[in-house]
């Protein structure tokens, strides 16, 4: 891993992940980097645009990927896309939240390259209709679908608890236990740490 990547949250020879907690609701924004090609993507556009631009300054940013359309995840999207001049990817079901259309859709099962890395799009509605996660071996960017101790909030307009539980069970909990989970807020967890709690979440209904 190149020493020029400042303060990585996770790094090995295959992948570098930066994690920035920004804004009044402590949103996590991630930068995913292939250290071999230095190509990167930025996940979400929550706040503190100067920090986000600085976080990709030591890489060749290729795109902005959005996990979903909640306002706290897209707050600085418009100035950020104008500054970075890269395409914005988002699931069509949440595209109405944007002032300008996304440049490309995210569909379940899509495989997106970042240099030599490949990330699979997992459509996981329930928190929002267009919520997605991004998975590569060992790592899951979970947006607001999965957190330590439970799923994302579904007690909201358009939220669907049964649906988000189905998505977590069928798409996320089939991943290996050691898969690191990077949520849209708060601390990391792993699939193995969360899977045993599923019945408890169902029983409490949130």
Image (tube, helix red, strand yellow):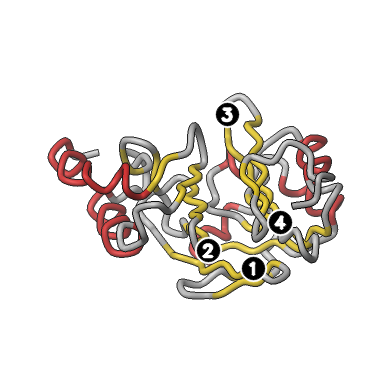
Q: Is residue 128 above or below residue 186?
A: below
Query: Comparing marks 3 and 2, which lies closer to the viewer?
Result: 2
Q: Nearer the viewer, residue 16 or 57?
A: 16
The answer to which of marks 4 and 2 sits earlier in the sequence is 4
Residue that carries the numbered disc 3 in the rendered image? 26
The answer to which of marks 3 and 2 sits earlier in the sequence is 3
Q: CA distance from mark 3 to mark 1?
A: 28 Å
Q: CA distance from mark 1 to mark 2?
A: 8 Å
Residue most extreme to the left: 203
Residue that carries the numbered disc 2 in the rendered image? 136
The answer to which of marks 1 and 4 sits earlier in the sequence is 4
Q: Nearer the viewer, residue 6 or 55?
A: 6
The x and y percentages for residue 67 are 54, 53
Residue that carries the numbered disc 1 in the rendered image? 117
The answer to which of marks 1 and 2 sits earlier in the sequence is 1
The x and y percentages for residue 37 are 79, 66
Callout 2: helix, strand or loop?
strand
Callout 4: helix, strand or loop?
strand
């Amino acid at each position: 891993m190149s020493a020029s990547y400042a303060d990585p949250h996770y790094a090995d020879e295959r992948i570098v992940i930066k994690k920035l907690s920004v804004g009044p609701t402590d949103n996590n924004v991630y930068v995913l980097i292939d250290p071999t090609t230095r190509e990167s993507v930025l996940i979400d556009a929550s706040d503190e645009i100067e920090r986000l631009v600085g976080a990709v300054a030591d890489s060749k940013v290729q795109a902005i990927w959005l996990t979903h359309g909640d306002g706290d995840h897209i707050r600085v999207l418009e100035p950020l896309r104008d500054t970075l001049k890269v395409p914005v990817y988002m699931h069509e079901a949440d595209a109405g939240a944007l002032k300008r259309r996304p440049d490309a859709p995210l569909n379940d099962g899509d495989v997106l390259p970042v240099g030599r890395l490949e990330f699979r799009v997992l459509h996981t509605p329930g928190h929002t209709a267009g919520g997605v996660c991004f998975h590569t071996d060992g790592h899951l960017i979970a947006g607001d679908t999965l957190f330590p101790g439970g799923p994302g909030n579904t007690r909201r307009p358009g939220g669907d608890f049964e649906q988000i539980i189905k998505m977590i069970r069928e798409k996320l909990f089939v991943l290996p236990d050691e898969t690191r989970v990077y949520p849209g807020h708060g601390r990391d967890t792993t699939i193995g740490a969360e899977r045993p709690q599923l019945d408890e979440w169902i029983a409490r209904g949130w």
